[in-house]
Image (cartoon, rainbow, N blue to C red):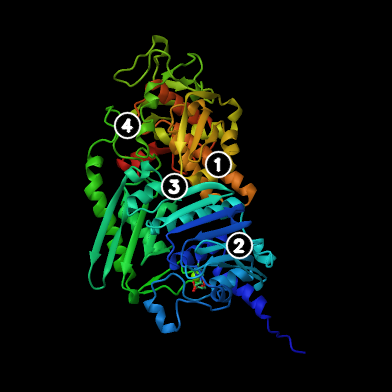
């Protein structure tokens, strides 16, 4: 009894469709590329339910006559290639005639299209890859294609689709890329009937960047060009300086011969170009176009043409890296030589890896701590950091200009905490490390990492003790429409952490209240990190998502609220840190995993000085 059967053509086509159609965003890509190939100058994209309910692409391109409109759904139907040898010469996006056939195999399609040679257009409805209905309609020149019931006929694939928000995020990212790659085309994007992007045609990439991102980002962009002969490679684009960054790689857009590609090596080359001027874990904003001779790349290696294979990958990567670093040398070196925060001698000019000092100068909080007054109950040594409240009149600031009330002045150097932790404060090294002598020897405590750990533990385990305060001036944070859409479903998570934020229009989030520790923190940056955190964990199950995002959010809150390296501390504040760190959990590392302290034992010191072996 034979067990091998041949799949019906329709079933085989549904399987093949999986190669081209990974998710709703793949359909959007194929449809928009068809519109571009059709010479459209305006492309409108309507999405509903992350693309699962509706994907509609309307263009003003050349359209199709009735015969082509029916034929375009056939397998290998293409107007762009007639033999394999043509592939190398292609300048269009499509060339295999696979997209519409694949899409029709896994959805219901309504196509309305007209050419300028015909007075009326054609309307076609397909179901299970069969053309059901063809009628003549009146419509503008161009093509309007609607995709519905996506993957209804392939339940096995449908269940792999992610939450609407995740699918929407992929679509928004793609449309950003298509818009950046084609500034001369007017793009309109809506989601669930809400306008998200409207980018009228412009000759300028910088203006397109403003339309897609925002003014603040585009004001920090610098033009980049680089060229070399044999092999011919030319690079053009815009990349941001050190003052703008993101928490993921999603704003590094790379195009090769006009095609948006996801080439990790090229992305790494861009990041390398920034050297160490961005802190660890932060990523630049860049939109770069690489042009090479068509015969030095293979664009046929990926079913959805998202990747390219270079004949000389290293040369391309090197040119990209140096183009970026030249731009930075030209535009940024001066800033880095000058202190970025010129107002106080307490400011350091070098960022620590997890302290994003440069991100948003308007909201900088480096000075925040200095303006806080210490109120301290004289008899206990475990009063909380929470009692570091902002001053009403006088501020206790640095060693040099501190205004210490007599009863606040530490009278003894040696402290005994309730947990019988005995230590002597020796001093503060480089306004960064607290030096203490204990029975074991010498301990260095990183003041930022330690305070971060203390605050993290408070946010994680004793959040009910944390006081939330209404901000006198609500803080408005501007985000891209895609990021707004991403963050809105998760505002309750911020809420649970004492951050009361509401959407405000299409592009803003307004923060009304925060935990008291964050009163002076850079909230804009906190919201940016939160977007990065959601993006990073969006593919997880709900439970895991909640767990990981909560941890990451608390860590960010702690980081933003904590004192920084370079902040000058009074003795009282140093004692607070030492004692609370000692009294808390997980005291040896900060929430990011960096050590909070380093102990040199007496025997280690003795061995170093050769007093013992
Ligand atoms: P390919 O783009 O690889 O040729 P597709 O399946 O995407 O294959 O499209 C098949 C054909 O349908 C195209 O070659 C083109 O002739 C026609 N077509 C598809 N979309 C459009 C459109 N928006 N406007 C005009 N023609 C289109
Ligand atoms: Mg195509």
The residue pinned by badge 3 equals 247
The reply to whether dot 4 and dot 1 touch (C-beta < 8 Å) is: no
Left or right side of 474 for 356 = left
Q: Which image quarter is the C terminus in? A: top left
As measured in the structure, the alpha-carbon distance from the residue carrying label 2 to the one carrying label 4 is 64 Å
> Residue 591: x and y, percent?
49, 40
The residue pinned by badge 2 equals 147
Marks 2 and 4, the one that precedes in the sequence: 2
- Between marks 1 and 3 in the image, the one whose residue lies nearer the viewer: 3
> In the rendered image of this protein, does residue 48 appear above or below residue 473?
below
Marks 4 and 3, the one that precedes in the sequence: 3
Residue displayed at 35% across by 35% down:
361
The reply to whether dot 2 and dot 3 touch (C-beta < 8 Å) is: no
Q: Residues within 10 Å of mark 1 (few under 14, many from 20)?
A: some
Left or right side of 172 for 444 = left
State the SS at label 2.
strand
> Residue 26: x and y, percent?
53, 63
**Residue 540 in view:** no
Depth check, front residue: 251 or 584: 251
The residue pinned by badge 1 equals 551
As measured in the structure, the alpha-carbon distance from the residue carrying label 2 to the one carrying label 1 is 39 Å
| Residue 465 tag number | none
Q: Residues within 10 Å of mark 2 (few under 14, many from 20)?
A: many
> In the rendered image of this protein, does residue 126 appear above or below residue 45?
below
The residue pinned by badge 4 equals 429
- Between marks 4 and 1 in the image, the one whose residue lies nearer the viewer: 1
Left or right side of 497 for 407 = left
> In the rendered image of this protein, does residue 118 appear above or below residue 167?
below
């Amino acid at each position: 009894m034979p067990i091998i059967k041949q799949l019906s053509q329709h079933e085989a086509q549904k399987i093949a469709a999986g190669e081209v159609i990974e998710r709703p965003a793949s359909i959007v890509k194929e449809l928009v590329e068809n519109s571009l190939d059709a010479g459209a100058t305006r492309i409108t994209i309507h999405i509903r339910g992350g693309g699962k309910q509706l994907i509609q692409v309307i263009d003003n391109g050349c359209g199709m006559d009735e015969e082509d409109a029916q034929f375009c759904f056939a397998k290998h139907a293409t107007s762009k290639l007639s033999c394999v040898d043509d592939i190398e010469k292609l300048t269009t996006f499509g060339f295999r005639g696979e997209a519409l056939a694949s899409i029709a195999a896994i959805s219901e399609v309504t196509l309305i299209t007209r050419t300028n040679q015909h007075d009326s257009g054609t309307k076609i409805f397909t179901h299970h890859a069969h053309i059901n209905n063809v009628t003549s309609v009146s419509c503008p020149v161009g093509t309007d294609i609607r995709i519905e019931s996506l993957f209804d006929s392939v339940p096995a694939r449908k269940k792999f689709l992610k939450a609407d928000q995740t699918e929407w995020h992929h679509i928004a990212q793609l449309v950003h890329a298509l818009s950046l790659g084609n500034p001369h085309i007017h793009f309109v994007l809506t989601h669930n009937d809400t306008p998200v992007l409207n980018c009228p045609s412009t000759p300028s990439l910088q203006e397109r960047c403003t339309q897609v991102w925002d003014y603040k980002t585009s004001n920090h962009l610098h033009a980049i060009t680089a060229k070399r002969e044999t092999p011919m490679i030319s690079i053009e684009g815009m990349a941001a300086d050190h003052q703008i960054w993101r928490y993921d790689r999603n704003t590094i857009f790379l195009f090769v011969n006009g095609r948006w590609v996801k080439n990790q090596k090229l992305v790494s080359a861009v990041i390398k170009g920034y050297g160490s001027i961005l802190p660890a874990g932060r990523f630049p904003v860049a939109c770069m176009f690489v042009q090479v001779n068509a015969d030095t790349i293979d664009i046929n290696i990926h079913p959805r043409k998202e990747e390219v294979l270079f004949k000389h990958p290293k040369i391309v990567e090197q040119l990209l890296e140096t183009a970026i670093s030249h731009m930075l040398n030209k535009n940024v070196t001066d800033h880095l030589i000058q202190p970025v925060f010129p107002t106080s001698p307490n400011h350091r000019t070098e960022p620590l890896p997890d302290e994003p000092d440069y991100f948003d100068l308007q909201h900088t909080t480096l000075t925040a701590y200095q303006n806080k007054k210490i109120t301290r109950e004289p008899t206990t040594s475990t009063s909380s950091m929470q009692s570091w409240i902002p001053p009403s009149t006088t501020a206790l600031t640095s060693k040099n200009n501190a205004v210490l009330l007599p009863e606040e002045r530490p009278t003894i150097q040696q402290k005994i905490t309730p947990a019988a932790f005995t230590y002597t404060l020796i001093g503060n090294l480089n306004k960064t490390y607290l030096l203490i002598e204990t029975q074991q020897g010498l301990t260095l405590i990183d003041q930022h990492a330690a305070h971060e750990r203390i605050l993290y533990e408070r946010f994680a385990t004793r959040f009910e003790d944390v006081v939330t305060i209404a901000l006198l001036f609500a803080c408005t944070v501007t985000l891209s429409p895609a990021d707004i859409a991403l963050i809105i479903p998760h505002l309750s998570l911020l809420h649970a952490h004492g951050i009361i934020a509401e959407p405000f229009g299409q592009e803003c989030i307004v923060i009304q209240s925060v935990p008291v520790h964050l009163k002076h923190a850079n909230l804009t940056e906190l919201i940016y990190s939160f977007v990065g955190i959601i993006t990073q964990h969006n593919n997880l199950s709900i439970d895991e998502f909640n767990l990981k995002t909560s941890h990451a959010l608390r860590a960010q809150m702690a980081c933003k609220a904590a004192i920084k390296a370079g902040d000058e501390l009074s003795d009282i504040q140093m004692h607070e840190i030492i004692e609370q760190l000692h009294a808390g959990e997980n005291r040896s590392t900060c929430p990011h995993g960096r050590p909070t302290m380093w102990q040199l034992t007496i025997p280690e010191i003795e061995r170093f000085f050769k007093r013992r072996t």
